[in-house]
Image (cartoon, rainbow, N blue to C red):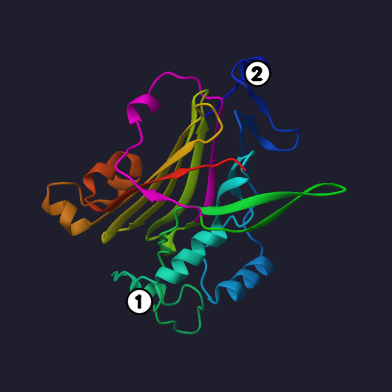
Amino acid sequence: MEVEVNEKELKSVGAELLPEGRRGLRILGWEIETLKRPILNSLDVQQWEQKLQTSHLPEMVFGNSCLVLKHINSGTKVHFNAFDALTGWKKEALPPVEVPAAAKWKFRSKPFQQVILDYDYTFTTPYCGSETVEINTQRGRETSEEGSCSLHWEDCEEQIDVVALASKEPILFYDEIILYEDELADNGVSLLTVKVRVMPSSWFLLLRFWLRVDGVLMRLRDTRMHCIFGNGTNPIILRESCWREATFQALSAKGYPSDSAAYSDPSIISQRLPIIMRKTHKLQVSSA
């Protein structure tokens, strides 16, 4: 999706592009930025394996790519990156999916040495975003100190207004970032992406983990966040997480195709997958 908006249009809705060399914009108290970088090199991979205490990573890890949404007055920052997502994968430690091709996959990492599949090779993650707060201090000039925090997300019954999101409101900024991807030795796909779009009234994002193990299993874990700008002082972020999952056998029993080629686009087939978990939270962003 290509979005072309000139500076005059941005200014009319209280927005401006980030300085040259950065991709994103500032709008009504928010700074939204995306960063796209190449996959990790072999040295980076070794460092990540040490930090994560694993000898397994996805084939393609875009470790320096990220999406950052920062509320300027409060310093509240919601961001998305591959390292934290893989930390979640390591912590959840799901049992490996049993597949007919398992014998073949035992040799995927070390061709001359049999490797037992004793880890979740699908890299399924419960990750729904990262949080930090930047604190500005005055030491001759303003600097920022960033530390880990736990923002107070409350359970809620409110839902993201998808009808409003489907309106013809102009899109001021759009981007999609791949965080990691693995083709499961040509037996499917494991993909984590985050998409963001900014309109004059709000921002919206979709973090999606999509797994298809050909002939065996499909898994979809979506996290959506929506923030209406309002007066910009104490905005509310709604966050919906929805996990769906089904085996090819179960789908076939319902009359759906059993051919993997029919399931290349998760957006099209998501409604066929039964929900196994759904929860909604909201965050009241308080200005400092």
Pointer 2: residues within 10 angstroms few (<14), some, or many (20+)? Answer: few
The residue at the far right in this view is 140
Which portion, as a residue range, is magenta?
Answer: 151-180
Position of the C terminus by quadrant: top right
- Between 25 and 244, the one lying in front of the other is 25
Element type at mark 1: helix
The residue depicted at 46 percent of the width and 52 percent of the height is 152
- What secondary structure is marked by label 2? helix
| Residue in the image at 61% along x and 32% along y | 29
From the image, tell me which residue sits under label 2: 11
User: Alpha-carbon distance for marks 1 and 2?
Assistant: 59 Å
In percent of width and height, residue 107 lies at 45, 77
Q: Residue at x 39, y 49 (%)?
A: 154
Badge 1 amino acid: Ala
Instruction: Give how far across and how far down residue 279 sits, in percent.
Output: 31, 50
Which image quadrant is residue 161 in? top left
Q: Is residue 135 above or below residue 195?
A: below
The mark found on residue 208 in the picture is none
Residue at figure coordinates x 61%, y 69% from the top left: 48
Marks 1 and 2, the one that precedes in the sequence: 2
Q: How many marks?
A: 2
- Residue where numbered disc 1 is placed: 103
Q: Residues within 10 Å of mark 1 (few under 14, many from 20)?
A: few
